[in-house]
Protein backbone atom coordinates (compact mmCIF):
# COMPACT_ATOMS: atom_id res chain seq x y z
CA UNK A 1 0.00 0.00 0.00
CA UNK A 2 3.09 2.20 -0.13
CA UNK A 3 2.09 3.12 -3.66
CA UNK A 4 -1.40 4.21 -2.64
CA UNK A 5 -0.16 6.37 0.22
CA UNK A 6 2.51 8.10 -1.88
CA UNK A 7 0.01 8.65 -4.68
CA UNK A 8 -2.47 10.19 -2.22
CA UNK A 9 0.15 12.60 -0.92
CA UNK A 10 1.14 13.49 -4.48
CA UNK A 11 -2.45 14.38 -5.32
CA UNK A 12 -2.52 17.02 -2.61
CA UNK A 13 1.01 18.34 -3.14
CA UNK A 14 1.82 21.54 -4.99
CA UNK A 15 3.17 19.53 -7.91
CA UNK A 16 -0.06 17.71 -8.67
CA UNK A 17 -1.70 18.35 -11.98
CA UNK A 18 -4.38 21.00 -11.68
CA UNK A 19 -5.80 21.61 -15.15
CA UNK A 20 -8.94 19.78 -16.21
CA UNK A 21 -8.98 18.43 -19.78
CA UNK A 22 -11.68 19.71 -22.14
CA UNK A 23 -13.48 16.42 -22.80
CA UNK A 24 -17.03 15.31 -23.40
CA UNK A 25 -18.47 13.08 -20.65
CA UNK A 26 -18.19 10.08 -22.99
CA UNK A 27 -14.54 10.72 -23.79
CA UNK A 28 -13.74 11.36 -20.13
CA UNK A 29 -15.32 8.04 -19.21
CA UNK A 30 -13.30 6.19 -21.86
CA UNK A 31 -9.99 7.75 -20.86
CA UNK A 32 -10.51 7.21 -17.12
CA UNK A 33 -11.60 3.60 -17.60
CA UNK A 34 -8.56 2.82 -19.76
CA UNK A 35 -6.08 4.40 -17.33
CA UNK A 36 -7.77 2.74 -14.37
CA UNK A 37 -7.44 -0.64 -16.06
CA UNK A 38 -3.76 -0.07 -16.83
CA UNK A 39 -3.03 0.96 -13.23
CA UNK A 40 -4.84 -2.15 -12.00
CA UNK A 41 -2.66 -4.37 -14.22
CA UNK A 42 0.52 -2.68 -12.98
CA UNK A 43 -0.70 -2.92 -9.39
CA UNK A 44 -1.41 -6.62 -9.77
CA UNK A 45 2.05 -7.30 -11.22
CA UNK A 46 3.66 -5.20 -8.47
CA UNK A 47 2.02 -6.89 -5.51
CA UNK A 48 1.56 -10.44 -6.75
CA UNK A 49 4.65 -10.95 -8.88
CA UNK A 50 7.15 -8.39 -7.60
CA UNK A 51 7.64 -6.99 -11.09
CA UNK A 52 6.89 -3.63 -12.60
CA UNK A 53 6.98 -2.28 -16.14
CA UNK A 54 7.23 1.26 -14.77
CA UNK A 55 8.99 2.91 -11.85
CA UNK A 56 7.15 3.78 -8.66
CA UNK A 57 7.34 7.46 -9.59
CA UNK A 58 5.69 6.79 -12.95
CA UNK A 59 2.97 4.76 -11.24
CA UNK A 60 2.40 7.48 -8.64
CA UNK A 61 2.22 10.23 -11.29
CA UNK A 62 -0.31 8.37 -13.39
CA UNK A 63 -2.34 7.50 -10.30
CA UNK A 64 -2.40 11.18 -9.41
CA UNK A 65 -3.40 11.99 -12.98
CA UNK A 66 -6.37 9.61 -12.70
CA UNK A 67 -7.38 11.16 -9.36
CA UNK A 68 -7.29 14.61 -10.95
CA UNK A 69 -9.48 13.50 -13.86
CA UNK A 70 -11.94 11.88 -11.46
CA UNK A 71 -12.25 15.13 -9.49
CA UNK A 72 -12.65 17.10 -12.73
CA UNK A 73 -15.52 14.91 -13.92
CA UNK A 74 -17.03 14.23 -10.48
CA UNK A 75 -16.39 10.51 -10.56
CA UNK A 76 -15.98 8.45 -7.40
CA UNK A 77 -12.25 8.58 -6.58
CA UNK A 78 -11.86 5.57 -4.29
CA UNK A 79 -9.31 3.18 -5.75
CA UNK A 80 -10.10 -0.50 -6.05
CA UNK A 81 -6.54 -1.17 -4.88
CA UNK A 82 -7.32 0.38 -1.50
CA UNK A 83 -10.08 -2.06 -0.59
CA UNK A 84 -8.19 -4.99 -2.09
CA UNK A 85 -4.89 -4.41 -0.35
CA UNK A 86 -5.65 -2.51 2.83
CA UNK A 87 -6.07 -5.78 4.74
CA UNK A 88 -8.05 -6.63 7.86
CA UNK A 89 -5.37 -6.67 10.57
CA UNK A 90 -5.45 -3.53 12.68
CA UNK A 91 -2.18 -1.73 13.43
CA UNK A 92 -1.53 -1.12 17.15
CA UNK A 93 -0.47 2.38 16.10
CA UNK A 94 -1.38 4.00 12.79
CA UNK A 95 1.19 4.72 10.10
CA UNK A 96 1.12 8.48 9.63
CA UNK A 97 2.91 8.80 6.29
CA UNK A 98 5.04 11.87 5.64
CA UNK A 99 4.34 15.24 4.08
CA UNK A 100 6.76 16.02 1.25
CA UNK A 101 8.54 19.36 0.99
CA UNK A 102 9.47 20.55 -2.49
CA UNK A 103 12.53 22.71 -1.81
CA UNK A 104 14.84 24.29 0.76
CA UNK A 105 12.47 27.19 1.38
CA UNK A 106 9.56 24.93 2.32
CA UNK A 107 11.87 22.80 4.44
CA UNK A 108 13.18 25.91 6.22
CA UNK A 109 9.66 27.03 7.13
CA UNK A 110 8.90 23.61 8.61
CA UNK A 111 12.19 23.40 10.50
CA UNK A 112 11.51 26.78 12.08
CA UNK A 113 8.54 25.22 13.93
CA UNK A 114 10.52 22.21 15.24
CA UNK A 115 13.53 21.45 17.45
CA UNK A 116 16.01 18.62 18.05
CA UNK A 117 15.90 17.45 14.43
CA UNK A 118 17.36 14.32 12.85
CA UNK A 119 17.78 13.19 9.26
CA UNK A 120 17.46 9.68 7.82
CA UNK A 121 17.60 8.22 4.31
CA UNK A 122 14.16 7.67 2.82
CA UNK A 123 14.68 3.95 2.26
CA UNK A 124 12.94 2.70 -0.87
CA UNK A 125 10.96 -0.34 0.23
CA UNK A 126 7.63 -1.36 1.75
CA UNK A 127 6.44 -0.32 5.20
CA UNK A 128 5.72 -2.81 7.95
CA UNK A 129 4.71 -2.93 11.63
CA UNK A 130 6.60 -5.34 13.89
CA UNK A 131 4.92 -6.29 17.20
CA UNK A 132 7.00 -7.83 19.98
CA UNK A 133 5.34 -9.38 23.03
CA UNK A 134 7.15 -10.90 25.97
CA UNK A 135 10.42 -10.82 24.05
CA UNK A 136 9.20 -12.60 20.91
CA UNK A 137 8.09 -11.43 17.48
CA UNK A 138 4.33 -11.82 17.71
CA UNK A 139 3.12 -10.18 14.53
CA UNK A 140 4.14 -8.39 11.33
CA UNK A 141 1.57 -6.28 9.46
CA UNK A 142 1.85 -4.61 6.07
CA UNK A 143 1.18 -0.91 5.98
CA UNK A 144 -2.10 -1.20 4.10
CA UNK A 145 -4.09 2.00 4.44
CA UNK A 146 -2.21 3.04 7.55
CA UNK A 147 -4.89 1.73 9.90
CA UNK A 148 -5.20 -1.89 8.76
CA UNK A 149 -2.88 -4.12 6.76
CA UNK A 150 -2.12 -7.66 5.65
CA UNK A 151 -0.83 -10.40 7.95
CA UNK A 152 2.89 -10.75 7.14
CA UNK A 153 4.07 -12.61 10.24
CA UNK A 154 5.09 -15.83 8.47
CA UNK A 155 7.17 -13.91 5.94
CA UNK A 156 8.82 -11.84 8.69
CA UNK A 157 9.91 -15.00 10.49
CA UNK A 158 11.82 -16.00 7.32
CA UNK A 159 13.76 -12.72 7.14
CA UNK A 160 17.13 -13.09 8.92
CA UNK A 161 17.46 -9.31 9.35
CA UNK A 162 14.39 -9.22 11.64
CA UNK A 163 15.22 -10.35 15.21
CA UNK A 164 12.84 -13.05 16.36
CA UNK A 165 13.47 -12.34 20.02
CA UNK A 166 14.22 -9.12 21.91
CA UNK A 167 14.89 -8.20 25.51
CA UNK A 168 14.98 -5.07 27.61
CA UNK A 169 12.82 -2.08 26.61
CA UNK A 170 12.05 -3.67 23.21
CA UNK A 171 10.67 -6.93 24.66
CA UNK A 172 7.18 -5.42 24.49
CA UNK A 173 7.24 -2.89 21.70
CA UNK A 174 5.71 -1.86 18.41
CA UNK A 175 8.14 -0.83 15.68
CA UNK A 176 7.48 0.70 12.30
CA UNK A 177 10.02 0.42 9.53
CA UNK A 178 10.89 -0.30 5.92
CA UNK A 179 11.54 -3.68 4.40
CA UNK A 180 14.06 -3.22 1.64
CA UNK A 181 16.16 -5.14 -0.86
CA UNK A 182 19.67 -5.56 0.53
CA UNK A 183 22.21 -3.95 -1.79
CA UNK A 184 26.00 -3.98 -1.75
CA UNK A 185 27.27 -0.46 -2.30
CA UNK A 186 24.16 1.04 -3.92
CA UNK A 187 24.85 4.55 -5.27
CA UNK A 188 21.51 6.20 -5.92
CA UNK A 189 22.88 8.85 -8.28
CA UNK A 190 24.25 6.17 -10.61
CA UNK A 191 21.90 3.22 -10.14
CA UNK A 192 18.47 4.71 -9.42
CA UNK A 193 15.77 2.66 -7.74
CA UNK A 194 16.22 -0.55 -9.82
CA UNK A 195 12.62 -1.57 -8.92
CA UNK A 196 13.91 -2.64 -5.52
CA UNK A 197 10.58 -1.81 -3.88
CA UNK A 198 8.61 -3.99 -6.29
CA UNK A 199 10.90 -6.96 -5.65
CA UNK A 200 10.37 -6.76 -1.90
CA UNK A 201 6.62 -6.25 -2.26
CA UNK A 202 6.40 -9.31 -4.51
CA UNK A 203 8.40 -11.46 -2.09
CA UNK A 204 6.14 -10.48 0.83
CA UNK A 205 2.95 -11.14 -1.14
CA UNK A 206 4.12 -14.51 -2.48
CA UNK A 207 5.14 -15.56 1.04
CA UNK A 208 7.07 -18.66 -0.09
CA UNK A 209 9.98 -16.96 -1.88
CA UNK A 210 12.59 -17.83 0.75
CA UNK A 211 15.56 -16.74 -1.36
CA UNK A 212 14.11 -13.25 -1.84
CA UNK A 213 13.18 -12.96 1.84
CA UNK A 214 16.78 -13.74 2.81
CA UNK A 215 17.83 -10.73 0.72
CA UNK A 216 15.44 -8.42 2.59
CA UNK A 217 16.61 -5.94 5.21
CA UNK A 218 14.78 -3.84 7.79
CA UNK A 219 15.20 -0.16 8.64
CA UNK A 220 13.27 0.93 11.73
CA UNK A 221 12.17 4.54 11.55
CA UNK A 222 9.54 4.80 14.29
CA UNK A 223 9.00 3.43 17.78
CA UNK A 224 5.59 4.70 18.94
CA UNK A 225 5.54 5.35 22.68
CA UNK A 226 9.23 4.44 22.84
CA UNK A 227 11.89 6.33 24.85
CA UNK A 228 11.39 10.09 24.95
CA UNK A 229 14.46 11.18 22.99
CA UNK A 230 15.94 10.15 19.69
CA UNK A 231 19.32 9.41 21.29
CA UNK A 232 17.83 6.93 23.72
CA UNK A 233 15.70 5.29 21.02
CA UNK A 234 18.72 4.88 18.73
CA UNK A 235 20.84 3.40 21.51
CA UNK A 236 18.20 0.83 22.40
CA UNK A 237 17.56 -0.10 18.75
CA UNK A 238 21.27 -0.56 18.07
CA UNK A 239 21.71 -2.77 21.12
CA UNK A 240 18.75 -4.87 19.94
CA UNK A 241 20.32 -5.46 16.53
CA UNK A 242 18.66 -2.71 14.47
CA UNK A 243 22.03 -1.14 13.74
CA UNK A 244 21.13 0.57 10.46
CA UNK A 245 18.80 2.99 12.21
CA UNK A 246 21.51 4.27 14.52
CA UNK A 247 24.09 4.40 11.71
CA UNK A 248 21.88 6.37 9.34
CA UNK A 249 20.04 8.72 11.73
CA UNK A 250 22.05 11.91 12.17
CA UNK A 251 21.40 15.19 14.03
CA UNK A 252 20.92 18.36 11.94
CA UNK A 253 20.56 21.99 12.94
CA UNK A 254 20.03 23.87 9.68
CA UNK A 255 18.72 23.55 6.17
CA UNK A 256 22.33 23.58 4.99
CA UNK A 257 23.06 20.54 7.19
CA UNK A 258 20.09 18.70 5.71
CA UNK A 259 20.98 19.63 2.14
CA UNK A 260 24.58 18.50 2.58
CA UNK A 261 23.54 15.13 4.01
CA UNK A 262 20.90 14.66 1.31
CA UNK A 263 23.56 15.20 -1.35
CA UNK A 264 26.04 12.91 0.41
CA UNK A 265 23.60 10.00 0.65
CA UNK A 266 22.60 10.52 -3.00
CA UNK A 267 26.22 10.18 -4.15
CA UNK A 268 27.73 7.62 -1.78
CA UNK A 269 27.34 3.85 -1.41
CA UNK A 270 24.51 2.64 0.85
CA UNK A 271 23.10 -0.82 1.63
CA UNK A 272 19.70 0.11 0.17
CA UNK A 273 18.05 2.13 -2.57
CA UNK A 274 16.62 5.49 -1.51
CA UNK A 275 14.32 8.08 -3.02
CA UNK A 276 15.13 11.02 -0.76
CA UNK A 277 15.56 11.81 2.91
CA UNK A 278 13.32 12.09 5.97
CA UNK A 279 13.68 14.80 8.61
CA UNK A 280 12.00 14.16 11.95
CA UNK A 281 11.77 15.84 15.31
CA UNK A 282 12.94 13.88 18.34
CA UNK A 283 9.76 14.64 20.28
CA UNK A 284 6.71 12.72 19.11
CA UNK A 285 3.08 12.74 20.31
CA UNK A 286 1.65 9.67 22.08
CA UNK A 287 1.06 6.77 19.68
CA UNK A 288 -2.69 6.86 20.28
CA UNK A 289 -2.77 10.22 18.48
CA UNK A 290 -1.09 8.94 15.31
CA UNK A 291 -3.32 8.99 12.22
CA UNK A 292 -2.65 8.59 8.49
CA UNK A 293 -1.62 11.94 7.04
CA UNK A 294 -1.16 13.53 10.49
CA UNK A 295 2.60 13.13 11.07
CA UNK A 296 3.35 16.81 11.61
CA UNK A 297 6.71 16.05 13.29
CA UNK A 298 8.22 14.43 10.19
CA UNK A 299 8.69 15.46 6.54
CA UNK A 300 10.34 13.97 3.47
CA UNK A 301 12.45 15.73 0.85
CA UNK A 302 12.60 13.45 -2.18
CA UNK A 303 15.22 13.39 -4.87
CA UNK A 304 14.08 14.74 -8.19
CA UNK A 305 13.57 11.73 -10.46
CA UNK A 306 15.94 11.60 -13.42
CA UNK A 307 12.88 11.10 -15.63
CA UNK A 308 9.35 12.40 -15.17
CA UNK A 309 5.94 11.76 -16.65
CA UNK A 310 4.11 14.45 -18.56
CA UNK A 311 1.33 14.73 -21.13
CA UNK A 312 1.76 15.35 -24.84
CA UNK A 313 -0.36 18.40 -25.61
CA UNK A 314 0.26 18.63 -29.36
CA UNK A 315 2.43 17.34 -32.21
CA UNK A 316 4.15 19.83 -34.52
CA UNK A 317 6.33 19.41 -37.60
CA UNK A 318 9.27 21.61 -38.53
CA UNK A 319 11.20 21.69 -41.79
CA UNK A 320 14.94 22.36 -41.63
CA UNK A 321 17.06 24.10 -44.24
CA UNK A 322 17.97 20.79 -45.93
CA UNK A 323 14.31 19.82 -46.13
CA UNK A 324 14.36 17.32 -43.31
CA UNK A 325 11.00 17.19 -41.49
CA UNK A 326 11.35 16.90 -37.71
CA UNK A 327 8.54 15.98 -35.32
CA UNK A 328 8.23 17.99 -32.10
CA UNK A 329 6.03 17.03 -29.15
CA UNK A 330 4.66 19.96 -27.19
CA UNK A 331 4.46 18.90 -23.55
CA UNK A 332 2.66 19.89 -20.42
CA UNK A 333 5.52 21.87 -18.81
CA UNK A 334 7.67 20.00 -16.31
CA UNK A 335 10.89 20.68 -14.42
CA UNK A 336 13.93 18.44 -14.84
CA UNK A 337 16.99 19.38 -12.84
CA UNK A 338 16.93 23.19 -13.16
CA UNK A 339 15.31 23.24 -16.61
CA UNK A 340 11.71 23.93 -17.54
CA UNK A 341 10.87 21.54 -20.36
CA UNK A 342 7.97 22.18 -22.75
CA UNK A 343 9.09 20.46 -25.98
CA UNK A 344 10.95 17.34 -27.01
CA UNK A 345 12.35 16.39 -30.40
CA UNK A 346 10.92 13.07 -31.60
CA UNK A 347 13.10 12.91 -34.71
CA UNK A 348 11.87 12.04 -38.19
CA UNK A 349 8.27 11.48 -39.19
CA UNK A 350 8.99 7.76 -39.60
CA UNK A 351 10.35 7.55 -36.05
CA UNK A 352 7.30 9.39 -34.72
CA UNK A 353 5.08 6.89 -36.49
CA UNK A 354 7.00 3.98 -35.00
CA UNK A 355 6.70 5.52 -31.52
CA UNK A 356 2.94 5.87 -32.07
CA UNK A 357 2.57 9.10 -30.10
CA UNK A 358 -0.61 11.21 -30.14
CA UNK A 359 -1.80 14.21 -28.12
CA UNK A 360 -3.04 13.03 -24.73
CA UNK A 361 -0.40 10.31 -24.35
CA UNK A 362 1.65 10.18 -21.14
CA UNK A 363 5.38 10.03 -21.81
CA UNK A 364 8.55 9.70 -19.73
CA UNK A 365 11.01 12.53 -20.30
CA UNK A 366 14.62 12.84 -19.10
CA UNK A 367 17.65 15.00 -19.89
CA UNK A 368 20.33 13.68 -22.21
CA UNK A 369 23.84 15.10 -22.58
CA UNK A 370 24.12 18.89 -22.27
CA UNK A 371 20.65 19.03 -20.73
CA UNK A 372 18.74 18.25 -23.95
CA UNK A 373 15.26 16.80 -23.26
CA UNK A 374 14.67 13.32 -24.65
CA UNK A 375 11.78 10.90 -24.79
CA UNK A 376 12.50 7.69 -22.87
CA UNK A 377 9.24 5.85 -23.51
CA UNK A 378 5.47 6.14 -23.80
CA UNK A 379 4.05 5.01 -20.46
CA UNK A 380 0.36 5.24 -21.36
CA UNK A 381 -1.52 5.94 -24.60
CA UNK A 382 -4.82 7.75 -24.61
CA UNK A 383 -7.86 6.04 -26.07
CA UNK A 384 -8.48 8.82 -28.59
CA UNK A 385 -5.68 8.47 -31.18
CA UNK A 386 -6.11 11.65 -33.22
CA UNK A 387 -2.80 12.36 -34.88
CA UNK A 388 -1.96 15.35 -37.07
CA UNK A 389 -0.96 14.91 -40.69
CA UNK A 390 2.73 15.56 -41.42
CA UNK A 391 3.64 17.92 -44.27
CA UNK A 392 2.65 16.43 -47.60
CA UNK A 393 5.06 18.44 -49.78
CA UNK A 394 8.33 16.69 -50.58
CA UNK A 395 11.15 18.78 -49.15
CA UNK A 396 14.85 18.30 -49.86
CA UNK A 397 18.08 20.24 -50.24
CA UNK A 398 16.85 21.84 -53.49
CA UNK A 399 13.47 23.12 -52.31
CA UNK A 400 12.32 26.43 -50.84
CA UNK A 401 15.06 28.85 -51.92
CA UNK A 402 12.08 30.93 -53.06
CA UNK A 403 9.22 32.00 -50.80
CA UNK A 404 5.82 30.33 -51.19
CA UNK A 405 3.01 29.43 -48.76
CA UNK A 406 4.06 25.78 -48.50
CA UNK A 407 7.72 26.70 -48.10
CA UNK A 408 7.69 29.03 -45.11
CA UNK A 409 9.26 26.60 -42.58
CA UNK A 410 12.20 25.63 -44.80
CA UNK A 411 12.52 29.15 -46.23
CA UNK A 412 13.04 30.69 -42.78
CA UNK A 413 15.31 27.81 -41.77
CA UNK A 414 17.48 28.70 -44.79
CA UNK A 415 17.52 32.38 -43.81
CA UNK A 416 18.44 31.52 -40.21
CA UNK A 417 21.32 29.32 -41.41
CA UNK A 418 22.39 31.99 -43.90
CA UNK A 419 22.88 34.58 -41.14
CA UNK A 420 24.60 32.20 -38.70
CA UNK A 421 28.33 32.01 -38.06
CA UNK A 422 28.56 29.05 -40.43
CA UNK A 423 27.11 31.27 -43.18
CA UNK A 424 27.47 35.03 -43.64
CA UNK A 425 27.71 35.78 -39.89
CA UNK A 426 25.10 38.57 -39.88
CA UNK A 427 25.16 39.67 -36.26
CA UNK A 428 21.79 40.12 -34.56
CA UNK A 429 19.73 38.28 -37.17
CA UNK A 430 17.82 35.15 -36.18
CA UNK A 431 14.55 33.60 -37.22
CA UNK A 432 12.37 36.23 -35.53
CA UNK A 433 14.30 39.04 -37.23
CA UNK A 434 13.90 37.44 -40.65
CA UNK A 435 10.19 36.97 -40.08
CA UNK A 436 9.86 40.65 -39.18
CA UNK A 437 11.63 41.71 -42.38
CA UNK A 438 9.68 39.26 -44.52
CA UNK A 439 6.36 40.41 -43.10
CA UNK A 440 7.13 43.96 -44.22
CA UNK A 441 9.02 43.38 -47.49
CA UNK A 442 7.90 39.97 -48.82
CA UNK A 443 11.19 38.54 -50.10
CA UNK A 444 11.16 36.66 -53.37
CA UNK A 445 14.10 34.44 -52.40
CA UNK A 446 16.64 33.98 -49.63
CA UNK A 447 18.91 36.82 -50.87
CA UNK A 448 16.22 39.45 -51.56
CA UNK A 449 17.29 41.36 -48.45
CA UNK A 450 20.38 42.53 -50.37
CA UNK A 451 18.15 45.01 -52.22
CA UNK A 452 16.69 46.63 -49.10
CA UNK A 453 17.73 50.25 -48.58
CA UNK A 454 18.56 51.82 -45.25
CA UNK A 455 15.35 53.85 -45.49
CA UNK A 456 13.33 50.66 -45.95
CA UNK A 457 15.04 49.00 -42.98
CA UNK A 458 14.44 52.05 -40.77
CA UNK A 459 10.75 52.10 -41.75
CA UNK A 460 10.18 48.39 -41.04
CA UNK A 461 7.51 47.91 -38.32
CA UNK A 462 9.12 46.44 -35.22
CA UNK A 463 12.60 47.70 -36.11
CA UNK A 464 13.88 50.96 -34.65
CA UNK A 465 15.97 53.44 -36.62
CA UNK A 466 19.02 52.44 -34.60
CA UNK A 467 18.44 48.76 -35.29
CA UNK A 468 17.77 49.52 -38.96
CA UNK A 469 21.10 51.33 -39.26
CA UNK A 470 22.87 48.42 -37.61
CA UNK A 471 21.25 45.95 -40.02
CA UNK A 472 22.22 48.12 -42.98
CA UNK A 473 25.81 47.97 -41.75
CA UNK A 474 25.67 44.19 -41.25
CA UNK A 475 24.20 43.62 -44.73
CA UNK A 476 27.00 45.69 -46.27
CA UNK A 477 29.58 43.64 -44.37
CA UNK A 478 27.92 40.46 -45.68
CA UNK A 479 28.35 41.69 -49.26
CA UNK A 480 32.12 41.68 -48.72
CA UNK A 481 32.30 38.16 -47.32
CA UNK A 482 34.49 35.73 -49.34
CA UNK A 483 32.94 33.43 -51.93
CA UNK A 484 33.32 30.37 -49.70
CA UNK A 485 30.95 31.96 -47.16
CA UNK A 486 28.33 32.68 -49.81
CA UNK A 487 28.15 29.13 -51.11
CA UNK A 488 28.02 27.90 -47.51
CA UNK A 489 25.08 30.28 -46.97
CA UNK A 490 23.39 28.82 -50.05
CA UNK A 491 23.68 25.34 -48.54
CA UNK A 492 26.11 23.62 -50.89
CA UNK A 493 26.46 19.95 -49.79
CA UNK A 494 30.21 20.27 -49.14
CA UNK A 495 31.94 19.96 -45.80
CA UNK A 496 33.88 22.97 -44.57
CA UNK A 497 37.08 20.91 -44.72
CA UNK A 498 36.49 20.16 -48.41
CA UNK A 499 35.75 23.79 -49.20
CA UNK A 500 38.98 24.80 -47.47
CA UNK A 501 41.02 22.65 -49.89
CA UNK A 502 40.76 25.42 -52.49
CA UNK A 503 38.02 23.94 -54.68
CA UNK A 504 35.69 26.84 -53.94
CA UNK A 505 37.43 29.68 -55.80
CA UNK A 506 34.50 30.80 -57.98
CA UNK A 507 31.11 29.68 -59.21
CA UNK A 508 32.53 28.99 -62.66
CA UNK A 509 35.31 26.82 -61.19
CA UNK A 510 32.79 24.79 -59.23
CA UNK A 511 30.65 24.16 -62.30
CA UNK A 512 33.60 22.98 -64.35
CA UNK A 513 34.30 20.06 -62.03
CA UNK A 514 32.98 16.67 -63.10
CA UNK A 515 31.69 13.87 -60.91
CA UNK A 516 35.12 12.24 -61.21
CA UNK A 517 36.82 15.49 -60.10
CA UNK A 518 34.63 15.69 -57.01
CA UNK A 519 35.08 12.01 -56.26
CA UNK A 520 38.86 12.48 -56.24
CA UNK A 521 38.57 14.64 -53.13
CA UNK A 522 39.15 12.98 -49.72
CA UNK A 523 35.95 11.65 -48.16
CA UNK A 524 33.82 12.15 -51.29
CA UNK A 525 32.29 8.99 -52.70
CA UNK A 526 30.35 8.53 -55.91
CA UNK A 527 26.97 9.25 -54.28
CA UNK A 528 28.24 12.45 -52.64
CA UNK A 529 29.91 13.60 -55.86
CA UNK A 530 26.66 13.10 -57.78
CA UNK A 531 24.77 15.05 -55.10
CA UNK A 532 27.18 18.01 -55.42
CA UNK A 533 26.89 18.13 -59.23
CA UNK A 534 23.09 17.86 -59.08
CA UNK A 535 22.98 20.72 -56.57
CA UNK A 536 25.23 23.00 -58.66
CA UNK A 537 23.14 22.52 -61.81
CA UNK A 538 19.69 22.65 -60.19
CA UNK A 539 17.58 25.48 -61.73
CA UNK A 540 16.79 27.30 -58.43
CA UNK A 541 20.47 27.24 -57.40
CA UNK A 542 21.63 28.35 -60.84
CA UNK A 543 19.07 31.16 -60.80
CA UNK A 544 20.30 32.42 -57.43
CA UNK A 545 23.92 32.29 -58.59
CA UNK A 546 23.09 34.45 -61.64
CA UNK A 547 21.19 36.90 -59.42
CA UNK A 548 24.14 37.17 -57.01
CA UNK A 549 26.42 37.81 -59.98
CA UNK A 550 24.19 40.75 -60.92
CA UNK A 551 24.65 42.06 -57.37
CA UNK A 552 28.44 41.85 -57.90
CA UNK A 553 28.94 39.35 -55.06
CA UNK A 554 32.49 37.95 -54.89
CA UNK A 555 33.05 34.80 -56.96
CA UNK A 556 29.77 34.77 -58.88
Image: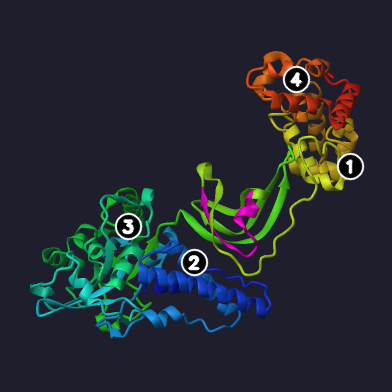
Q: Secondary structure at mark 1?
A: loop
Residue 442: numbered disc: 1
Q: In the rendered image, which quarter contains the C terminus?
A: top right
Of callouts 4 and 2, the N-terminal one:
2
Q: Can you say whether 166 is above or below 450 in the image?
A: below
Q: Is residue 114 visible?
A: no
Q: Which residues are magenta?
A: 351-367
Count of numbered tags: 4
Tell me if mark 4 has few (under 14), some (14-19) or many (20+) residues whose alpha carbon lies within 10 angstroms of its own: some
Q: In this figure, which residue is indicated by the disc labeled 3?
A: 273
Between disc 4 and disc 1, the foreground one is 4
> Which residue is at the front of the view, 466 or 47?
47
* Other residues around mark 3 within 10 Å, as few (<14) / some (14–19) / many (≥20): many
In the image, residue 307 above or below residue 167: above
Going from N to C along the chain, the mark reached first, 4 or 1, is 1
Give how far apart the Cα atoms at labels 4 and 1 are: 37 Å
Q: Which residue is mark 4?
A: 515
- Mark closer to the chain start, 3 or 2: 2
Q: Which quadrant holds residue 459?
A: top right
Residue to which mark 2 is pinned: 61
Q: Nearer the viewer, mark 2 or mark 1?
A: 2
- In the rendered structure, which disc, 3 or 1, sits on the residue that comes first in sequence? 3
Magenta-span inclusion, residue 136: no
Amino acid sequence: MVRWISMLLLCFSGGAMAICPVWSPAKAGQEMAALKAQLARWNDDYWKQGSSEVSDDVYDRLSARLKQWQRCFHEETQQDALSALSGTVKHPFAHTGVHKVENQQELGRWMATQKDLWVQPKVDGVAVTLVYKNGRLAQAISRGDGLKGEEWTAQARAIPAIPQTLSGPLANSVLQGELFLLRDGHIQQQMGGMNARAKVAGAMMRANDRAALKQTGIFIWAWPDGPGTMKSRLAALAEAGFTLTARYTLPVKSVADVDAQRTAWFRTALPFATDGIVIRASAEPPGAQWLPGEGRWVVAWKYLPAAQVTEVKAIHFTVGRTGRVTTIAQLEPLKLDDKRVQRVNLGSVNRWRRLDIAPGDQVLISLAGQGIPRLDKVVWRSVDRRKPQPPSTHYNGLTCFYASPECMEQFFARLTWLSSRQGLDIEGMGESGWRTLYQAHRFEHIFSWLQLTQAQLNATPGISATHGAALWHQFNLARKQPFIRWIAAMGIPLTKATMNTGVAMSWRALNRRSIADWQALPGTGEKKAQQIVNWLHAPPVDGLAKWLAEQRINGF
